[in-house]
Image (cartoon, rainbow, N blue to C red):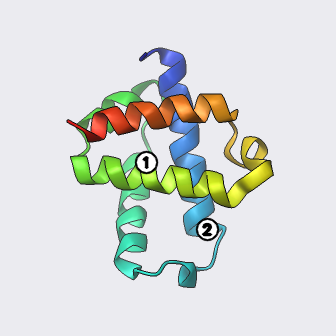
Amino acid sequence: METPETSFHAWILTGNALNLLLHGVSPDAFADPTVRDHLVRLEEELKDFPPDEMLTRLHALPKEDKKLLATACRQAMTLAGENAETTLGLTREEAEAVLRLLAHESAH
């Protein structure tokens, strides 16, 4: 369900996940450098949106970008492991709610 809180959670998760993947791990960790480049572009595109506008912005992304962002968030959760809540700023349940929303959006 989309609420201002969900939009805030999407802002937190996407920002922290992109930060971890792009600035917290070695660029060599990406098997395909074009994926990293795509994530850099998405980070640049999303960085200035206020939290209450994040869902609107995510809705407007092309399907391919939504899928990549969902994959990036899941990868960041995996990398963060037991520290995911601290590293990504959300509980697993909050993050999963955002991921379900992204998955639903990716299907359209």
The amino acid marked with disc number 1 is: Ala
Query: Residue visible at 70% across and 39% down?
Result: 89
> 10 Å neighbourhood of mark 2: few (<14), some, or many (≥20)?
few
Quadrant location, the C terminus: top left
Residue 78 vertical position relative to residue 89 in the rendered view, above or below:
below
Q: Is residue 14 left or right of residue 44?
A: right
Q: Is residue 12 left or right of residue 42?
A: right
Mark 2 element type: helix
Query: Residue visible at 28% across and 41% down?
Result: 106
Residue 80 picture quarter: bottom right
| Nearer to the camera, 31 or 33 | 31
Question: In this figure, which residue is indicated by the disc labeled 2?
Answer: 23
Query: Which disc, if any, is residue 70?
Result: 1
The amino acid marked with disc number 2 is: His
| Nearer to the camera, 108 or 23 | 108
Residue 79 picture quarter: bottom right
- Which percent across, then down, holds residue 26? 62, 79
- Which percent across, then down, holds residue 35? 38, 71
Q: Is residue 6 visible?
A: yes
- Which percent across, then down, holds residue 60? 24, 37
